[in-house]
Image: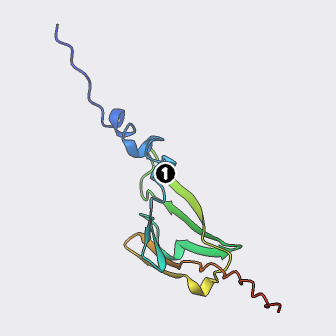
Amino acid sequence: MLLTKRNNLFDEFFNDPFFTDAYHDRQSLMKTDIEDKGNDYVIEIELPGYKKEEVRAELKEGYLTIYAETVSENEVKNQKNFIRRERYSGAVKRSFYVGSGLKQEDVRASFENGILKLVVPKETPKQIEENHYITIE
C-alpha cells in the first residue's frame, strides 16, 4: 500500500521563519556598524521596515539613544471566514556612550533606505593645565 502525505497549504505556512521566534530574534534588530573616521565616528544602524517618522535620536547625559517604534495592521476586507488576522506593534531601543561634552547640535543624522546614519564628533579630551612653577632665586 502506498502512503501519500496530504499537502495542506496551512500545514507549512505558519512554520515559515517569519512566524517563528527565530525571525524576531533580538540579535537581528538594529544591526550597527561604527566606523572611526579620524575626527568623527560614523554610526550606521539598520532599521528595515521603519519610516523616518518612526525613528528618534536623543542625546542625554552623554548617551546617544536611538528609538524606533512601528505599528502595522493587515486588514481583511469583505471576507467573513478569514483564517488568520495579524497585527504587529514593535519598538526597539539602543544606547551608546558618546561623551558628556557633546551637544545635540554636534550630532548629524540622516535616514535613507532603512539605514540611520549618525555622525558623532569625537569628544576632545580636556587639556589638563600644566603647573607653571615660579622660579625661586
| Left or right of 121 in this view: 137 | right
Residue 66: quadrant of the picture: bottom right
> Mark 1 highlights which residue?
86
What x and y, as percent, mark residue 46? Answer: 43, 64
| Left or right of 20 in this view: 12 | left
Query: Residue drawn 38% across and 36% down?
Result: 15
Query: Of all residues shown, which one is farthest toward the top?
Result: 1
Query: Residue drawn 83% across and 90% down?
Result: 136
What x and y, as percent, mark residue 83? Answer: 43, 43
| Left or right of 121 in this view: 12 | left
In the picture, the quarter occupied by the N terminus is: top left
Label 1 element class? loop
Residue 113: quadrant of the picture: bottom left
Query: Residue drawn 54% across and 77% down?
Result: 122
| Left or right of 73 in this view: 12 | left
**Looking at the image, residue 133 lies above or below residue 29:** below
Callout 1 amino acid: Glu
What x and y, as percent, mark residue 45? Answer: 46, 66
In depth, the one of 132 and 27 nearer the eye is 132
Q: Is residue 83 visible?
A: no
What x and y, as percent, mark residue 10? Answer: 35, 36
Query: Residue drawn 44% across and 41% down?
Result: 22
In depth, the one of 85 and 14 nearer the eye is 14
Q: Residues within 10 Å of mark 1 (few under 14, many from 20)?
A: few
**Looking at the image, residue 10 lies above or below residue 65:** above
Total count of labels:
1
In depth, the one of 72 and 103 nearer the eye is 103
